[in-house]
């Protein structure tokens, strides 16, 4: 069992940066793949980024590529999402999610077993 807690959200201006954290408890993070998703009001939850177990490879949605960076600190059992050059369309509740050994499509939310409670990110113009 893994418990995930996100933090770091807030209200920022266009072009600002934020760093979200996803802290895990219960099991070591190093054997899990951790993804970030977001959900804006009235829209479906969408994939943002993932960091793969083992290789540490990262993948991003086209909408955030070049602006967001996902990283992990295994010693702290924490995954981060560094968000730069924020835009109003980045406004959403951001969730982290974890799974062991995804063999399907890591962009699909149903591939993940554990979810955090979400943190609100609001980008004001």
Image (spheres, rainbow, N blue to C red):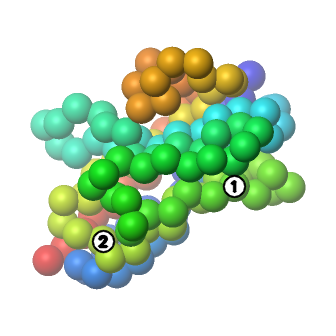
Where residue 55 sits, quadrant-wise, is top right
| Residue 11 in the image: above or below residue 100 | below
Horizontal placement of 75 versus 69: left or right? right
Q: Quadrant of the N terminus?
A: top right
Q: Name the disc covering residue 72, or none.
A: 1
Q: Quadrant of the C terminus?
A: bottom left
* Residue at left offset 35%, top offset 48%: 61
Q: Nearer the viewer, residue 93 or 107?
A: 107
Q: Nearer the viewer, residue 108 or 12?
A: 108
Name the spot of residue 19 as percent of width and height, x first.
Answer: 51, 68
Where residue 31 sits, quadrant-wise, is top right
Name the spot of residue 81 as percent of width and height, x first.
Answer: 52, 59
Q: Is residue 23 visible?
A: no
* Residue picked out by circle 2: 86
* Residue at left offset 23%, top offset 69%: 87
Mark-to-mark CA distance, 2 and 1: 21 Å
Circle 2 sits in a helix, a strand or a loop, which is it? loop
Q: Residues within 10 Å of mark 1 (few under 14, many from 20)?
A: many
């Amino acid at each position: 069992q893994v418990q995930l807690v996100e933090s770091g959200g807030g209200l920022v201006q266009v072009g600002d940066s934020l760093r979200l954290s996803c802290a895990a408890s219960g099991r070591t993070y190093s054997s899990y793949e951790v993804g970030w998703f977001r959900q804006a009001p009235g829209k479906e939850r969408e994939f943002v980024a993932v960091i793969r177990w083992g290789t540490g490879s990262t993948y991003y949605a086209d909408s955030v590529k070049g602006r967001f960076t996902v990283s992990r600190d295994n010693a702290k059992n924490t995954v981060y999402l560094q968000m730069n050059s924020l835009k109003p369309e980045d406004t959403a509740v951001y969730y982290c999610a974890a799974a062991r050994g995804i063999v399907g499509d890591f962009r699909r939310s149903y591939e993940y077993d554990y979810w955090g409670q979400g943190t609100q990110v609001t980008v004001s113009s």
